[in-house]
Image: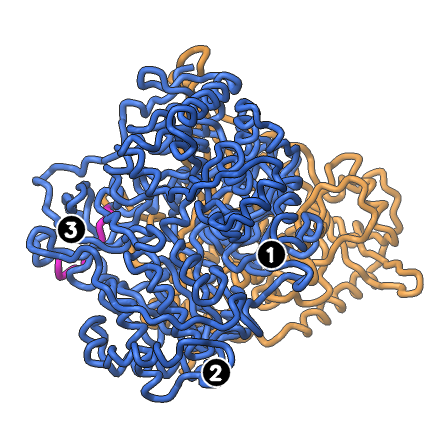
Amino acid sequence: MLNDIYLLKDLSILNAHLAQHYSVVRLAKDTDGEVTWTEQAGATSAPLFGHANLPLTSPKAFFFPEQESLYKFDGKTFETIHPKVKPIVLFGVQACDLTAIAYQDQFFKHDPYYQTRRDSVLLVGIDCEAPCKNGFCAEVNAGPHVNSATADLILSRLKIDDRTNTSEWLIVASSEKGVDSLRDLTLEKADEGHFKLRTKLGDQVRSQFADFSYISNAIEYLNDKSIPAQLWEELSVRCLSCSGCTNLCPTCSCYSTFEVIEAEPISNTLEFETVRCWDSCLFESFQREASDHNPSHKAAQRVERFWFHKFSDEYLPEFERHGCVGCGRCEQTCPGTIGVHSVMKRIDEVCCN
Amino acid sequence: MSQTQVNSICPFCGVGCGMGLVVNDGCINAVKPLSKHPISQGKLCAKGWNTPFGISKHNRITQPLMKKEGVFEVIGWQEALTYIAQNLQKCIRESGSQSVGVISSARATNEDNYAAQKFARAVLKTNNIDHCARICHSPSVVGLKQTLGSGAMTNSIDDVAKADVILIIGADSTENHAIIGGHIMQAKLRGAKLIVVDPRQTRLAQIADLHLQLNIGSNIALLNGLLNIIFQHNWQNDDFLARRCEGTDALKKHVADYPLDKVAELTGIEGQKLVEAAKLYSQANAAFLAYGIGITQFISGTNNVIAVSNLALVCGQIGREGTGVNPLRGQNNVQGACDMGSLPNVYPDYQSAADKKVREKFSHAWNTTVAQAPGLTSLGMSNQARNGKFRGLIICGEDPIVTDPDRNKVEASMRAMDLLVVVELFMTETAKMADIVLPAASFAEKDGTFTNCERRVQLIHKAIEPPGEAKADWQILSEIAKKMGLGGLMNWQTSEQIFDEMAQLTSSFSGMTYSLLAKKNGIQWPCNAEHPKGSRWLHTTTFPIGKGKLIPVDHVPTNEQPDAYYPFWFTTTRLHYHYGCGSMTRQSPLLERETPNGLLYIHPQDALDLGLKNHQAVTVSSRRGYLETRIVLSNELVPGLLSMPYHFKEAPSNMLTNDAMDPTTEMPELKVCAVNIVPLPKNQSPCPSSISTDIEDWVIQ
């Protein structure tokens, strides 16, 4: 890896280079102050940092869209609807979201729609320089610095010169795709010292995180199944089944399919299109069977299952990590205040007594 | 894959959450919550999250349709407009302007609503203009106008966070105003005391400190009882009463007639709980009172609202942060539709249509002669149609067949009309009855403003083109005006021009412009020279009518009560997953899947007594109609009380509901009637009562 580390003062050079081969998608703030992933060909400014600008929606939908046509049937034959893709670079993804993408890569390993979209994307990660508002990535091993297995290129700011308002960036090409993407770009080589400085800066950010031991404790309680059923009842009264947590969770991947039927006036036939859309395990009907039997009939069972999926050790063999990447988005979006911090705090409170 | 995001406002309930519309290739397949929005702060409810389905191009009406021999045929806009104009003119010529009218939409923009009432008053020359506030909060508009001088939420949603005590009466806010429901749950977590008054054990009732599970229809007895306790214990706010109110002595004397034992008997609530609630509310530093249609949808609706207002005034829980009398409005723009004067008795900003000066003002401003005679309410139009006196109606985006009481009567009224025009997104039950159906643009396909229940006027933005030939309501009404030879009256090019015209003719909106609204995440009215930044709180120093009025009101029994033939109480509810007539939310496969297997909720004890099993098929009947559905066992109810959500055309609760009216506002008693249930024969499935299934295949190309 030390062969593929570089230094760069002006990131717009990298931006412009990648723009020759990719549509550049970066975080941008709109006039209402919302941070969203936006296509920006000629951006020259430094990327927005995650710790101050983690977007409320992760890049999940670039690979696994909210709605996606899968195939159609005209009464005689089925035809696959291939996703239309173009090469894009996601420029400046935070460590938590990269961890989530790696997680979903596993889940959708054999899903051709996901993989087609995923193959067309170059991931440029960026190291966070401080903890963000609801984030606890360090507690769940998903940040604040980018894990090199999760990105193609990693950007890390080593120094800021306040006088000239310039920075020195370390660029790590951490995958073959990343190495390829830098071809024909002349860059200054970095050395081991720079790499060590990055590690040191990462440790510094890590030490700035608040005490999230209640999360680690609650993970233990979740796994030794010592949480009283009454607690799930108490929490689940506050679950409105809005689906906000599962929609915003960067690792949630449940979907449903439905049929769109269109009349074809010329041939006077019907065309059926099967579309998949994001679903939510917090819906009562998510697991309801045709017989009306429902293995998670009670809201308490559904809420318990959601957190089990995020923190159970049972998923470690498949994913090599827990399902939660510590972004904290569920805490902000939950109308009932049962996002990750509220729930884990309550579990810790109840179980440690 | 080029993707943009257009920030707008959720089209469902009156909370008015921020919503980013994600546009891909001219379609909206996703929405995002907006983290910086002052109310929703990154949250949406299930309805909001499913918005893309509710406006998707599939199943939308995209061209004008005319019914010929019972079947709809696609026609051109010009043909449709000419037909409508000629037939409206024929009705007016033969039967006068009183024979035609408009029902506007609480889901449409302020601009659409301003255009609708102007079209009625200036083009048709009638005050026959109404909308669904008639059947949700018309008693709030009238009742609070009498007692406080203004019929909207006195405080802001954010005030929930500042209150020590929160009192919720007749509102299932986690289901219907989910984000406000969330604010309330959050307040409870931080230590605020929560009191819920509701005949059902709602979600908030389950977490409340006190749940006053009153007998249905005993609101005034309860509120007068609380007032009597407060006076007896000297818990009233004497200073506030002396400075800001009138009528204290009369009220005190009046409520003395509601002693604890009598109130306990009428409401079914033990006295100790009533005392506790009275103490909590009256002694709080700041108590936030919110109510819903569990107050308004009664024959005593207006008096119920007055009783609520009495309680807040006596305790001085108004005019300060964290307090207030706060009606939770059901629809995204029902506040705005009222504000814009889509009501027979008022022009925009509640300027009285009965006032000659107001009529002269608008005649002058619009350069015409406006309607002179008093107008009919929506139920009035319906009744007159059955008498042959009301002949032509334009309905924009409402589905009275599903949502109005006593469906058989509503259906008969519509059949009796000579001309029924429905402007819609989807082929609703009401649209199926129409002579002409016109394709409407959805909220994502036009510019304009919505006003949420805390009086916040917020901009919505056009994100995509309307499908096919659909247009905004105001554009359609302008075109009809043109065909009637009065196009000059409604000659707007943009929604902003309509807003500016409206702002010039009102006080509460005179300080607002689109550019100011864009800068500030919306502005709460009144916004004028006196309040240039808008108004978070109303009535801080004085009421618009001077002193607050305490008006004694009496408990009246509901119009119908269980008897030997109809032995059960029956009430209507809403589900978190669905909205109104279901025309938008039921397009979502996920929300549709959430629809329960049966729609009649019953206490397990009643089911046991009747020998019914969960999900067993039954018929439900009242004096007005009957329907078939399955039962769902629910502990939210008390024995003897049944409930049904009203969203479903297959089993419309309005087959059963009572249209007995509040004498002041003609609000029907939708919240209570008497019914009977009988099991269907074994193996027989419930038969849906949807309208005219023969025109389900509605379009001939």
Magenta segment includes B604: yes
Expressed as whole percent of the image width and height from the top left, the position of residue B672 reads 24, 55
User: Which residue, given by chain and number where applicable, does mark 3 sit on?
Assistant: B675
Asked whether residue A152 is in view, the answer is: no
Residue displayed at 53% across by 18% down: B78
Whichever of callouts 1 and 3 sits on the residue coming sooner in the sequence is: 1
Depth check, mark 1 against mark 2: the one in front is: 2
Q: Regarding mark 3 in the picture, which secondary structure is present there?
A: strand
**Bounds of the magenta segment:** B598-606
Magenta segment includes B38: no
Residue displayed at 37% across by 38% down: B399
Q: Nearer the viewer, residue B293 or A305?
A: B293
Asked whether residue B197 is in view, the answer is: yes
User: Which residue, given by chain and number where applicable, does mark 2 sit on?
Assistant: B242
Residue type, mark 3 in image: Val
Query: Judging from the image, what is the letter of the chain drawn in blue?
Result: B
For the residues labelled 1 and 2, the Cα–Cα distance comes to 28 Å
Residue displayed at 44% across by 57% down: B141
Q: Chain of mark 2?
A: B
Q: Chain of mark 1?
A: B
Residue A342 lies left or right of residue A185; in this view the side is: left
Depth check, mark 1 against mark 3: the one in front is: 1
Residue A59 lies left or right of residue B698; in this view the side is: right
Image: B250 above or below B460: below
Are tags 1 and 3 found on a single chain?
Answer: yes
Q: Regarding mark 2 in the picture, which secondary structure is present there?
A: helix
Are tags 1 and 2 found on a single chain?
Answer: yes
Packing grade of label 3 (10 A; few <14, some 14-19, many >=20) is many
Say the numbered circle drawn on residue B508.
Answer: 1
